Each structure stands twice: as C-alpha cells, then as structure tokens.
Image (cartoon, rainbow, N blue to C red):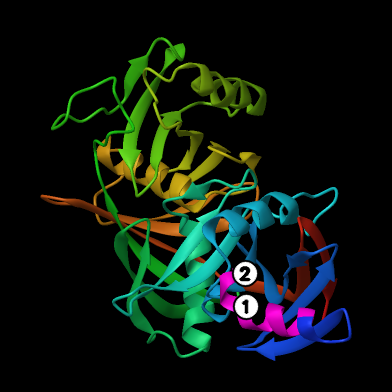
Amino acid sequence: MLQYYEKIARYAIASPKNRKVATIDFAKVEIIRNFGGIYAYIDMEFIKCHGSGNDFILIDATRYPDFSREEWSDFARKACSRESGIGSDGVLLVVRHEDGVYGMDMLNPDGTYAEMCGNGIRCVARLAYERNYIASEDVLRSGGRDYKVQRIEPIDGEETFGVDIPINTWSKDFTFYSAGERFVAQKIEALDEQLEFTALNLGNPHIVAEVESISLEHLTTLGERVLQLRELFPYGVNVSFYERRSSREIFVSTYERGAGLTLSCGTAMTASATAVAMRGRVDAGERIEVRNRGGRVFCTTKLEDSITTRLEGNATFEWYGEAEFKSGVLTFERK
C-alpha cells in the first residue's frame, strides 16, 4: 500500500509540516513522518449487515484497491472481535477481478480467507446491485467459482437475494474416501463412532449429520477435534448437525472453520438441505425451510447429473459506519 502513496509520502516529508492529509479515490490517506518512518492508513466506510443472523462487516474494497490481502487479514482479526472491535462473524469485501467480474472475498475472524459464504454472498450481491455493479440477475465470483445471484421478492419484508450453489460430492478437503465416490450418511469413526455424516463441498468443505436433538456441546467437541485430524481434513472442515422438524423444515447448527459456533452459516444450511434431499428425506426440487438460531432461509435441491442447491434469504443492512485502521490499531464510529 505504501508504494501507492510514495509520491505523497515524499511530499509530506519535504513539507515544513510533519503531517499532510490527502483525499484520493474515496480514501483519506494520512502520511506521518515519525523518526524517519512513514505510515499510512485508510478511513474506510463499512456496513454492518447480516444474512439469517450471520453478521458481517461489509466493505466495498473496489474503493481501496491498494489495501493488500495481508492488511485485510489483519483488519479482520481486529474488526471481528466482539470485545475490542466492531464485532462480527467475518468481513465481506466487494471485489472486482481483472476480467471485470465482480465478486466476494470473505475473511473469518482469525484472518483466514474462506472460499465461499452463502449468507455473505447475498449481502455482497445487494451492495453490488445497489451500486450498479451487477444487474438484478447476474454472477458473482468467490473462491475462483462463479455463482448465479438474483434479487427476488422480499421474505418477511427484508431485502432478499437467491444464489445457485453447485455441489461437489468430493474435493481435496476430504481424504477419507476416494475421488468419484460419494460419502452419504456414513460414519467417520475417528471423529465420532455413532454419527453418520454426509460430506459435501460448496466452494468450502462441510460434513453434516442428522441428529434427533442438537447438542451444541457435542458439536463444539467435534468442531475442535477436527483440528487434530489433519490426515482426514487437511484444510479443516465445517461441521453441522441438523434436526428434521417436519417434512419440509429442518433446523441446523454449525461449528464453522475459522470462526467456531455461529448463529448461522449459509453454506452449512445449504449443505444440510442438500444432504436431506440426497438421503431421500424430501423430494428433489422441493423447496424446504431451513432454520437456525439466527433466522431462516429456503433451499431447493436439484439432483441431476450435477447437484445444485438454490439458497434464498435476507440481505439486511443494519447500520453504516466509518473505520480507521492504522498501524494495527482500529477505531470506528457509526455514521
């Protein structure tokens, strides 16, 4: 980022004053001379948003093109803290790729990048749509994959978007079965001797198990145990339990990779709905309601040569703010 402002920095040092402030491309950049060192920060606008109770800090990163991936990671670690930061389940970035396609970068509270976030991509779609980056029916890219997104009729009076998520039944994230096979309702005894899991990749890896009653304590134990089973889950995995509440409703709880227990995880709800369809618990193509501790979404799974599940749910903007991130120190305020 400093290279981007090199000329400004030299100007600031040459000035009789120690400090200069410039406004460039929506970003206020402050250059400070401090014992020969040059430091820069960006005052950035953000939106506090949520999808089905999964709350995020949403930023249009196209306005801050020289903030590096490492700097965004550092920002996420500070900003997501519910004790000392803004507080959220992750950071969402609206990005624009070299071929002109808009997309989403999602960061977990630990600063790692997630390949996909079903609740997050709906919020990104809303901001991209409202800023005329995309049409009401378009494509967003995340984790190297393109996802069809669409603005649809509001649910419960909330701005609502749908996303079509291609489902892979195997990926390099799973080493306990072979490529070309499917792992549906089978045991992973090193993780749990009783439960039967279905393994799916939705851009990020998930294992889901049907249970009679969800125990968050047991779920947390398995989520933490995964970290000790690198031979089975070399890149970690999201772990979910789901209950069947009726023929057209399930309830899901998730221990997210890089985040822990969260109120909601869009891809976990989608994975659980997909597993229900793959097990024949509902008819393929039937729209079912998926609830969690944060809210609800609707999922429709198509079981054809390839599997696709449509996820529909809210993209709610709660409040707007400004953040200043300088030398690892975060300050923010509501607008």
Range of magenta residues: 1-13
Quarter where residue 4 is shown: bottom right
Give the labeled residue for mark 2. 2
Report crowding for label 1: few under 14, some 14 to 19, many 20 or more residues within 10 A (C-alpha).
Answer: some
Are the residues at dot 1 and dot 2 in contact (C-beta closer than 8 Å)?
yes
Give the labeled residue for mark 1. 5
The Cα atoms of the two marked residues, 1 and 2, are separated by 5 Å
Q: Nearer the viewer, residue 99 or 266?
A: 99
Q: Amino acid at mark 1?
A: Tyr
Report crowding for label 2: few under 14, some 14 to 19, many 20 or more residues within 10 A (C-alpha).
Answer: some
Q: Amino acid at mark 2?
A: Leu
Does the magenta run of residues contain 198? Answer: no
Would you say 333 lies left or right of 214 here? right
Q: Picture coordinates of residue 54 (x, y %)? A: 62, 55
Quarter where residue 90 is shown: bottom right
- Residue visible at 32% across and 42% down in the picture: 201
Q: Nearer the viewer, residue 15 or 80?
A: 15
Which residue appears farthest toward the left when viewing the image? 305
Q: Picture coordinates of residue 87 (x, y %)? A: 76, 55
Q: Nearer the viewer, residue 2 or 79?
A: 2
Q: Nearer the viewer, residue 296 or 164?
A: 164
Does the magenta run of residues contain 9? Answer: yes
